[in-house]
């Protein structure tokens, strides 16, 4: 059963006017949203949609928690009834605003992962998409439908970053490359979102690919990830909770 938020998450996913979006590089959630963007899947040539919209808020929330896990900003534990909880590492708050909002939500006490996903997820899409537009990865424009009505569409921004992310995930799932922890988490989250079949033929939907994706979901990231054992365990736990949460929702 998906838990509802214990209390509203104030300010999650919102950006203060004039505040720098990301001190460093893109967050894992930004990379995931960009990868889920399908540049030529819209009704008009060259426009796109976001794959898996119906489960998107859980998946993006999972990416935020996975990012916090990879940065050792949070740890997981066990709550009542054996549920998985997540708690903040008090001495290691993240700098990024969106990550910080999620970290603050679990800073006062451990909360169930499902509760956190439901609390932080619904407000993430807009701010993350804004960041991708600001970076030039995605472009917003207006097109006419049936020659009469203006509608907003999303287009590829021409930065080439989505192609790079897709190549990284393909290398992990198809070519059997040992992934970086970030690439492993990204591939596992795409698989957990239920959208991986939509990447065929770039990433063929085959038994070997599914098998490798299942390994990543369980935290089997290869020898190069050995040094990230704690982050790997945390991230694998979070990804599995994302899959549980998303499984009860209709796929989009």
Image (spheres, rainbow, N blue to C red):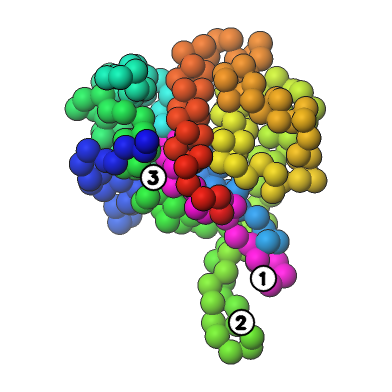
Residue 183 point in image, percent of width and height: 62, 29
Describe the element under mark 3 as helix, strand or loop.
helix
Q: Is residue 36 left or right of residue 12?
A: right
Q: Nearer the viewer, residue 146 or 133?
A: 146
Instruction: Write down the quadrant of residue 224 in the picture.
Output: top right
Q: Is residue 160 left or right of residue 186?
A: right
Find residue 121 and name its label. Answer: 3
Instruction: Write down the quadrant of residue 65 in the picture.
Output: top left
Q: In which quadrant of the rendered image does the C terminus lie?
A: bottom right
User: In the image, which residues are magenta?
Assistant: 42-64
Above or below: residue 92 compared with residue 55: above
Q: Which residue is mark 1?
A: 43
Residue 249 point in image, percent of width and height: 48, 47
Does the magenta portion include 189? no
Residue 102 point in image, percent of width and height: 32, 36
Find residue 145 and name its label. Answer: 2
């Amino acid at each position: 059963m998906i838990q509802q938020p214990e209390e509203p998450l104030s300010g999650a996913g919102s950006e203060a006017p004039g505040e720098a979006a990301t001190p460093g590089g893109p967050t894992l959630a930004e990379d995931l949203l960009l990868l889920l963007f399908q540049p030529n899947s819209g009704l008009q040539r060259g426009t796109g949609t976001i794959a898996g919209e119906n489960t998107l808020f859980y998946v993006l929330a999972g990416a935020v928690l996975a990012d916090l896990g990879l940065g050792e900003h949070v740890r997981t534990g066990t709550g009542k009834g054996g549920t998985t909880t997540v708690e903040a590492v008090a001495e290691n708050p993240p700098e990024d605003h969106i990550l910080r909002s999620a970290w603050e939500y679990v800073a006062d006490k451990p909360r169930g992962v499902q509760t956190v996903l439901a609390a932080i997820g619904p407000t993430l899409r807009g701010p993350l998409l804004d960041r991708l537009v600001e970076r030039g990865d995605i472009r917003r424009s207006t097109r006419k439908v049936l020659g009469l009505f203006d509608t907003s569409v999303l287009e590829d921004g021409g930065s080439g970053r989505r192609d790079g992310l897709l190549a990284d995930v393909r290398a992990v799932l198809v070519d059997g490359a040992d992934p970086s922890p970030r690439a492993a988490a990204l591939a596992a989250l795409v698989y957990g979102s239920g959208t991986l079949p939509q990447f065929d033929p770039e990433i063929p939907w085959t038994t070997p690919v599914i098998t490798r994706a299942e390994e990543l979901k369980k935290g089997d990231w290869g020898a190069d990830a050995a040094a990230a054992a704690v982050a790997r365990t945390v991230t694998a736990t979070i990804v599995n909770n994302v899959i549980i949460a998303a499984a009860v929702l209709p796929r989009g």
